[in-house]
Amino acid sequence: MIWRRAIKPALASLALAALCLSAAPAEAAISLVPTWIKSDPVSKSVRLDVAADWNDNNATGCGNLNGYFRGSVTILIPEGWRVTIDYHVIGDRHRHSLMLTRPYDPQNLPVKVSEAEAVDGIHSRNPIEGLAPGDNDQLHFTSKTGSYWLISAKGTDLITGVWIRLDVKDGLRKAELQFNDDWVRRGHPAGRM
């Protein structure tokens, strides 16, 4: 009988959690400033530290960016700020690159991309071949209002999910990370914080 008493409160808690999640407005996104985003409002600059293959999230899909993949997060950056991305390939199995592109249709991704698809030529060295595990690069640009993706353009990385979103908006006071609401609701493991 102890088993039944323990189960009822547990089921009630699960039901309450499910009700809260289903009742939350769809627009309610979770935002925070992780350790890998450093904003300097005085100089209007932001530094991002992005690591390919940060953990095993999407390991079957060949990689992630700071543990995130398939647009699970959006980096929000104020318009007109100087952006520096320190990029590292830290895994030991795959080559990767980093490229800033316009958004694609997630339901109709190209199998491969070309270097010409980089917005304003913003990409790491050898974007199609990728950087070897342990290699680093740095990207610099001034943010312009719009929606973009950060992708690995190496081989078929884009179609296997190695991409996250980056939005530049006027009126922001700092850079931050916004979680895709669906990602959080499905209980995916967190990436780098």
Image (cartoon, grey):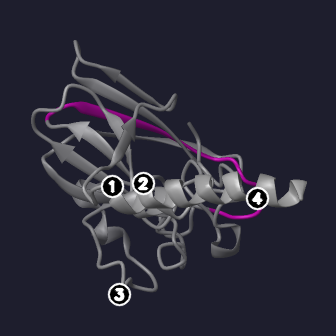
* Above/below status of 62 relative to 184: below
The quadrant in which the N terminus is found is bottom right
* Above/below status of 191 relative to 107: above
- Residue under pointer 4: 7
Disc 4 secondary structure class? helix
- The residue located at (56%, 36%) in the rendering is 193
| Residue type indicated by callout 3 | Asn
13 in magenta: no
- The residue located at (29%, 50%) in the rendering is 28
Q: Nearer the viewer, residue 182 or 82?
A: 182
Q: Is residue 136 left or right of residue 165?
A: right
| Residue type indicated by callout 1 | Ala
| C-alpha distance separating marks 2 and 1 | 6 Å
| C-alpha distance separating marks 4 and 1 | 26 Å
Give the foreground label among 2 and 3.
2
- Residue under pointer 3: 108
Disc 3 secondary structure class? loop
Q: Position of residue 174 (x, y in %)?
A: 27, 27
Q: Position of residue 135 (x, y in %)?
A: 65, 46
Q: Which mark is residue 24?
A: 1
Indicate which disc, 2 or 3, sits on the residue closer to the N terminus. Answer: 2
Give the foreground label among 4 and 1.
4
Q: Nearer the viewer, residue 162 or 107?
A: 107
